[in-house]
Image (spheres, rainbow, N blue to C red):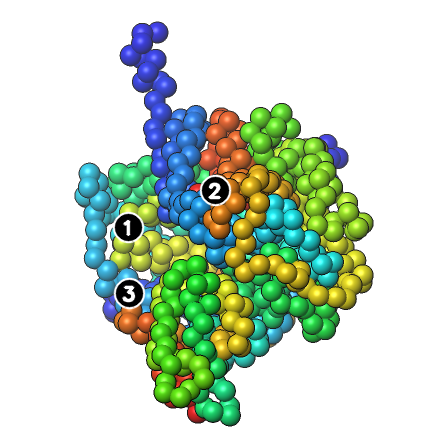
Amino acid sequence: MSIEAQSVLNETFVLNLGPQHPATHGVLRIKLTMDGEYIMDADPVIGYGHRMHEKMGENRSYAKFLPNTGRMDYVAALFNGHGYVGAVERLAGITVPERAEYIRVITSELNRVSSHLLWLGAFLVDLGGFTPLLYCFDDREQILDLLESVTGSRLTFCYYRFGGVSNDIDEDFVAGTRKFITRLRSRMPMYDAFVTKNIIFRKRVEGIGHISAETCRKYGATGPVIRGSGVAYDVRKVEPYSVYSKFNFDVPVFHECDCMARYKVRVEEMIQSMRIIEQALDSLPTGPVMAEKVPRTLKPAKGDCYYNVESARGSFGVRVVSDGSENAYRLKLRSPCFSNMSLFRECSEGMLLPDALALLGSLDLVIPDIDR
Amino acid sequence: MITYFKEIFNGLYTLFVGMKITFVHLFRPNVTVHYPRQTLKMTPRYRGHIDLTRDEATGKPKCVVCMACQRACPSGCIKLDGAKAEGAPRKSLTSYTLDFTTCSLCGLCVESCSFDALKFSKAYNLASMKKDDFKMDLLKRVLEKK
Amino acid sequence: MECLRLVLYVAGLLAFATFNAAYLSLLERKFPSWLQLRPGPIEVGPWGLLQPVADGLKLLSKQILTPQGADLLLFKLAPVMVVVPGILCLVTIPFSETLVARNFNLGLLMIFSFGAFGVFAVLLGGWASNNKYSSIAAARVVAQNIAYEIPMLLVVISVVFVTRTFNLHSIVEQQTGGFWHWNVLNLKASLMMPIAFLIYFICMLAETNRAPFDMVEAESELVAGAFTEYSGMGFGLFFIAEYVNIIVGCSIGTILFLGGWDCPFGLLPGVHWFLIKMYALCVAVIWVRWSFPRTQFYGLLNLSWKILIPFALVNLVLTAFMLKLFR
């Protein structure tokens, strides 16, 4: 066959899944080279939401950076805050009182549940089922109300401080959280019957979007992505931080490597988070919620510290390099979504467009976290 | 052959279960609040924009113009000024403006104040056509408050 | 006299079609909101009853944009072409013993031939928009509709075996007298009649491009599919056509399977029973849309070719067999 005839046969076109698209969960642009309905190449273009958070870390004092932590991955904002204050505390040698650690764990795990509920609803909207979104948001509202009664914010939290947390929790919060856990536990069978067992949903996600463990390791994907591919890597178990070593919980791992495995990992994680919250509430110690003698303007000694947190999306890391002055010399934010998204190009080759969008949805990306 | 029929039957059964679940929800009450006809009460710690607190004895704001809040603010939205009146022991406020368009509600100003002079208001119903409405004069607000 | 009667009927049918399209779209928004524990549209008019009026005014007030490079004639022809067959099908549907515009002997055949016309119009609209998204969606529509015409026609033919006529009026007359006479429970004609009704319902969902088979619109993937480039009343016409198709599909369902204007207990037959049954089927269509996610495209084709067609063929053979046995 002549070269001209071959090139006509191989005619591909470029489809722009633009920054404004209902399925890309933010401002992600993907340039798809398509052959009919099959994707030949998917080239993601990021940076539409770049706000230079890392540079802002160098421009302002440590305390002034705290509101920025809630604006990166805003769906699970408390984890970012935990990473940052943990890194600075490690650098400055501040010990956090136990009650504050317990409160951090409780609020972080509540945030994880709310993030997974949001993901569940959004993933199903991508697949075309609009009703579970509203059921998930019904549950999520209760979490946000609880967190609002403690921190004052619903989405972009600025709650953790160097040496503890800014406000203490009260009896209403404890009672409300216990009530919420009972309620969500009673609703999990409904989600199971409505979503997980639904034949149409299963046909959409079972066997779709295979990501092998090798690919995850190559791109540094963590979180539910790697746990759905059979590797039991969870920062809370591998490098325990805060008081997670005191709690009894399992790390859900599934070996099928498809979208269904990642879905099941996240549902199981919600159940395990509720276990952690219950144990934390049962053994909550009394005491102060803020370390004493934390200077107003923190000037940590020269050094370089890294602190790793298991965020709802993966391993979120903060590296702080200090030169002894009021501002950090360098603040590096390791974003889990960036690594998770980078495997999309390789994994979506040869897939149909709706399947690729199901894969993108199952990676649970929040684009401001990628762009920072 | 048997698996073919079993799969069809089980699949159809899950669809009917799904429809039953949505049907059951038809009879549950609404969970939404019909804003603006109904409103919710904000929790005590809700973060609206900041307000100066008033000393009930003197009727004046508690602020002593130490500038800690201005220094603590990451976005530079607080501008205050004060002067020492004749015979007064401390400085008192002459102006306090908050540029709410850049405020991120982080709460660092409220925490940095050791005189309990700042608090969060519960105002959430803020919408306006002019940017100037959000350059708030907090001194005027606290003096005019009943 | 006959001419005047026909003109009045057509005017009435147009009014019925547009009124239904408007208020079914409101039901489409209110019903899922009850399922989702929220009130739905309540602001415009009491209980949101004037919402379709507001929607219609909004669509009328938009500028009709034609994309650059679009085939102008086809682009403008497609919305008109998609509405006309639906309304024409309504002409031959008997709403009650006396309420029918024109009762053809081949009424059923006419309805199915006009149904295919609507598919052609969507294909033209998608292709003429000069937009990659629309072209992909148009190609999908054709494949989907062809795949689902076959089981639908097989099931309908098996019903025609029983009724021995294409005349819709006579089909309903054979089912009068209570729900045990209805075709869906006519197990003497075929043991698989209820399954045949289910197959008909699923095929109707696919033919009218409703979820879970709405790849055409596939909101979260292809923005608005074949209708991406249409604005204002062009989009409005596609919208109306979708609802008119649903009405026609549900009417044929009630006529063929549920006894048309017959009362379940044989007491007071009339147009009210027809409307109750038709709207019950419409509510079921809306209910199914909001309960499930969308199927995959190859899943849709698999369902048709591997499941629905075998079952429909078995039903056909079984009906023929039992008719030979029991007549």
Chain for mark 1? C
Q: Quadrant of the C terminus of chain B?
A: bottom left
Q: Secondary structure at mark 3?
A: helix
Query: Looking at the picture, how far across and down is residue C15, in whole percent?
Result: 32, 68
- State the image quarter where residue A253 is shown: top right
> What kind of residue is marked 3?
Lys
Quarter of the image for residue C132 reads top left
- Which of C221/C35 is in front? C221
Residue bearing mark 3? C58
Task: Let me know if residue A272 appears in the view.
Answer: no
Callout 1 amino acid? Tyr
**Distance CA(mark 2)–CA(mark 1):** 54 Å
Residue C82 place in picture, x, y as percent:
32, 50
Name the quarter where the N terminus of chain B is drawn.
top right
In percent of the image, x 46 and y 35: which residue is there? A353
Q: Nearer the viewer, mark 3 or mark 2?
A: 2
Examine the image and state in which quarter residue C55 appears.
bottom left
**Callout 3: chain:** C
